[in-house]
Image: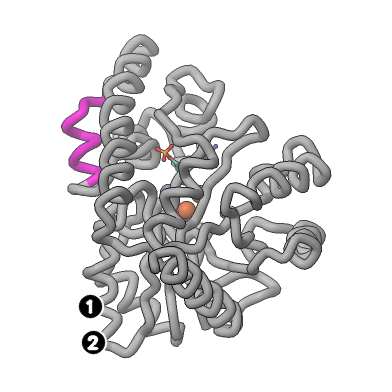
Amino acid sequence: MIDLHVHTTSSDGTLTADEVVALAGAIGLRAIAVTDHDTVAGVCEAKQAGERIGLEVVSGVEISAQSDRGILHVLGYFVQPDHPELIETLDSLRQGREERTPKILTKLRGLRVAVSLEEVNEEAAGGVPGRPHIARVLKRKNYVGTLQEAFDRYLKRGAAAYVQKRKLQPDEALRIIRAAGGIPVMAHPYSLLGRGASALEALIKRLIPLGLLGIEAYYPKHTPEQTELFLELARKHGLLISGGTDFHGANKPDIELGVIPGHSPLPYSLLERLKEAREQEKEILELFAN
Ligand code: AMP
Ligand code: ZN
Ligand code: FE
Ligand code: FE
């Protein structure tokens, strides 16, 4: 009934906020969270569309942070889309992306692969440019057969045209989300399992004092054992539990909105717990303000 991890054309999804909301309504979801990379630009449109059809839209964002243990993506639920410091931080992250794209294209040219900035921007269609947009151009121009091949041959970390983008430190990502009234949740923790479960647990223990409040235990790529592990870590460390598909439309063709094999429909109660936590947060903030 809910999907708390959804991308739109404001970042690297292929459906607009309106289209995602319409799809969510059509498949009978009750709520979605719009969690674009480094932007809240799709949130307002999605909320308005949601109101028209009676679908709850949670304001969200997904911020990448630099971690020594792999990719740390932090979801921020309920962030205020007009929070000045959040907007400033996201602007500077997008600036970093914009500086990265030409560097990737230069590396590609060195490999005799011709992709222009115009082609990438066209693919991003006003959204935040990212590697998936470059991958789509590579596929369209037949340099690769699939989007995955584009990542494996050129774009993934360690590949020939990889360029790192500026990332926040974990404490900065968590702090800005909390400052903007959001609940920070560790996204798709399987991507942090590279050094094993105890390393992930150590990371979680380090992030909780910095403001982490939840973990995305339900995710299409998690094996049943992994899901169990993440639920256990949540219980042990008092973290909230979230779940979502990371829907990107045609940029992740194997992912369907609202579908987490073995666990969907996800119960609305997960979102209720998150909302309760946000209310508590607000009360605490107000106490400090007075
Ligand atoms: P960017 O934000 O530009 O670094 O691109 C991140 C997006 O690229 C992620 O949301 C994924 O959808 C996709 N991505 C990253 N790494 C890979 C990979 N190794 N294979 C396929 N897709 C990837
Ligand atoms: Zn993405
Ligand atoms: Fe992510
Ligand atoms: Fe995502």
Which residue extends farthest top? 110
| SS at circle 2 | helix
Residue highlighted by disc 1: 48
**Quadrant holding the C terminus:** bottom left
- Mark 2 crowdedness (10 Å alpha carbons): few <14, some 14-19, many ≥20: few
Judged left or right of residue 185, residue 105 is left
Most common SS among magenta residues: helix
Q: Which mark is residue 236?
A: none
CB atoms of marks 1 and 2 within 8 Å: yes
Q: CA distance from mark 1 to mark 2?
A: 6 Å
Asked if residue 182 shows in the view, the reply is yes
Q: Residue at x 37, y 55 (%)?
A: 36
Along the viewing direction, whichever of 81 and 53 lies nearer the viewer: 81
Three-letter code for the amino acid on which mark 2 is drawn: Arg
Asked if residue 249 shows in the view, the reply is no
Q: Which mark is residue 52?
A: 2
Q: Residue at x 77, y 67 (%)?
A: 235
What percent of the width, then of the height, locates residue 199? 78, 40
| SS at circle 1 | helix
Along the viewing direction, whichever of 55 and 200 lies nearer the viewer: 200
What percent of the width, then of the height, locates residue 9? 28, 55
Q: Residue at x 52, y 83 (%)?
A: 1
Tell me where the magenta segment starts and ends, as one range.
115-124
